[in-house]
Amino acid sequence: MKLFLDTAVIDEIRIVHSWGVLDGVTTNPSLFAKAGGGTYEEVLEEICTITSGPVSAEVVATDLEGMLSEGRKFAKLAPNIVVKVPMTETGLSAISAFAEEGIKTNCTLIFSTAQGLLAAKAGATYLSPFVGRLDDIAQDGMDMVRELAALLMVQEMDAEIIVASTRSPRHVVDGALAGATVATVPFKVVQQMVKHPLTDKGIAQFEADWAKAQAELVK
Ligand code: E4P
């Protein structure tokens, strides 16, 4: 499974990249607003200097011409830019136009298997089912990922599933087991994936035993 960082914060991207586990980045207007640090284009260009993996840049226009013009501009910023398009009727038209132009897309805000099927048919490179937001309204987000993965396999469709709106390490693991090929994960959740209290306890124990052994040597 590939790991994308769901952020527009440059320092977070640098840190996870330095661990050797970063495969790409997804951004959206909310993440950009939270991060600041220049225009959206400047931030995207900087992200693309850190990772050569796919970097999703989301259009904000709601009309077709606007989506196409924003997406084409993003695609010119770097070869690894993927244009993120919301799951709407107009979004589907934009996705299919981008596919014809050879521009990769990530269909975002997917909340049902039917939506995922349409996006895959339109030619989306990536499908982003939002599991956390479905869980928030007391539905099982992972069920959708499981069903969508099965559907893509049975129908021999090429789109990749990005398990999105992840809120915990469990979402990442369950997404991988459900058949998503990518998880996009907030920095905090990646940090949680690293941590385990027994690892910390084990390190503290090794340090204490080592210090004891050194003290014995100098006696
Ligand atoms: C995906 O690409 C989105 O940016 C993201 O996963 C949304 O997550 P949220 O529901 O935590 O905002």
Image (cartoon, rainbow, N blue to C red):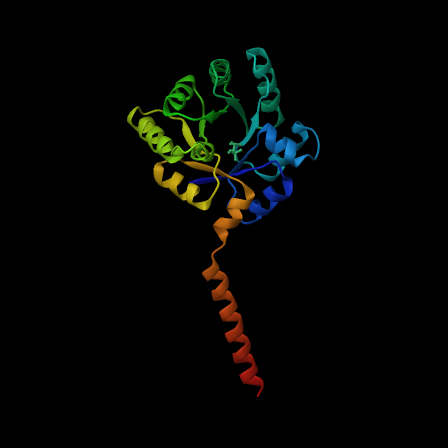
Image quarter of the C terminus = bottom right
Q: In the image, is 137 to the left or to the right of 61? A: left
Residue 190 in view here: yes
Q: Which residue occupies 45% across, 39% down? A: 2
Q: Which residue occupies 50% across, 20% down? A: 102
Q: From what the image shows, is residue 47 above or below residue 65?
A: below
In the foreground, 134 or 67: 134
Q: Which residue occupies 64% across, 35% down? A: 34
> x, y (%) of residue 149?
35, 31
Residue, far bottom? 219
Q: In the image, is 102 to the left or to the right of 45? A: left
Q: Which residue occupies 43% across, 26% down? A: 111
How many callouts does the rendering have?
Answer: 0
Residue, far right? 38
Q: In the figure, residue 69 lies in which quadrant?
A: top right
Residue 20 in view here: no
> x, y (%) of residue 68?
57, 15
> x, y (%) of residue 103?
52, 21
In the foreground, 169 or 43: 169
> x, y (%) of residue 199?
47, 61
Q: In the image, is 150 to the left or to the right of 103? A: left
Residue, far front? 138
Image quarter of the N terminus = top left
